[in-house]
Image (tube, rainbow, N blue to C red):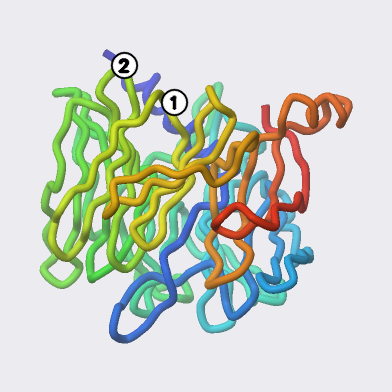
Amino acid sequence: MKKVGQVKRWLCIVLAVMMLLPVIPAVQVQAAERTAAPAYHGNSTYYAVYGTIFRLDAKSGTAKKVREIKQAFTVSDISYYNGYLYFAANFYYGTDGSNGYVCRMKADGTGFQKLARGYSPVIYDQKIYYIKTKHVVSPDNEYDDPIGIASMSLTGKNSKVLEKIAKNAYGPWSIAMADGKIFYTMWTEARGENFFKAYDIKKGTSETVIRSSNSLELSDCDSSYVYLCTEDGKKSIALVYEIKTGKQYKKTLPDYVTMAGGRDGILYFSRYETNATYAYNAKKGSVTTVLKNRRVEDITFSKSGYQVVRTVLTQKEFEASGYKYDMAMARMKLDGSGYKTLKKYYVS
């Protein structure tokens, strides 16, 4: 059993590492679907490498720097809405602690603002939903302690906690939204159980969708599906939850994998053993190879054309860089074609 102090430090490390990744947003806000704002607008898809935000042209595949957020170690969870970019920024330099804020700025990089302490912001129905935190400074560390799931205005006013985190519970580490619900996963220390939950915004109540002794990781969400990963103690299990029907599609995978994100009922993942990237089609129950000899660990989806992906460099590429870089942001289409490295960087 983990002690509370150990778990809090572990949570800090998890959050800091997560903020190195461009978290995958849901699809465009539409009156009929009422889904969360995405990281794209038109042909422009926004992503981050550490504390710098870039813009990819999904048609041409070219990328340009938008702005470097000064003193930010990482930027993540980017959404575009009405001319503004909303995102989380961690101002603690390193992965052994955190000092996170929900921020916004204009899409051209001007007008940067810190709105509130927290992480995993999602723009939905003209509000910001996020995980509200309390900043804690100890003699040997500083970190953000989650208070609960909250909402606030687009300018950071009228903050309200909707769902408090229970005692001896840890998480959520991220939230996703669609169909008037907030989806998240969490873990309780007392029973050692994991939960996949859905909070109904209109009703103000939450329900447990899945309760398991095995881990539950939220990977992604779109207007129809929530994409998760679980395991049976030996192997990973891809899990796609259909929002309207409540149906669960599961696929046991050959070994432990990294979930990269999902869209339109397809969950993308990579395997360390084969150094390749795959796509699991929930309705068909099939798994196909997207990229050979290339592990994609995260996808920031565009409306069409080129997508932004985070990949692990091959051993040959790592050696060729003089051991300077081990990761890269790249662009590719969802069938794996048109792959091109945009920027290499170092994480390990």
Q: Which residue is mark 2?
A: 2
Instruction: Measure how far apart labels 1 and 2 are at the Cα level.
Output: 10 Å
Residue 121 in the figure: left or right of residue 158 = right
Marks 1 and 2 in Cβ contact (< 8 Å): yes
Q: Secondary structure at mark 2?
A: loop
Q: Percent position (x, y) of residue 226?
A: 30, 54
Q: Which residue is mark 1?
A: 10
Query: What residue is at 68 percent from the left and 32 percent from the top?
Result: 347
Image point (35%, 53%), residue name: 175
- Type of the residue with mark 1: Trp
Left/right placement of residue 254 relative to residue 66 reads: left
Image coordinates of residue 65 in percent, x first then y, are 78, 63
Q: Of marks 1 and 2, which one's residue comes earlier in the chain?
A: 2
Across and down, in percent, residue 150 comes to: 31, 60
Tell me what residue is drawn at x 36 percent, y 73 percent. 124
Quadrant, the N terminus: top left
Quadrant for the C terminus in the image:
top right
Label at residue 95: none
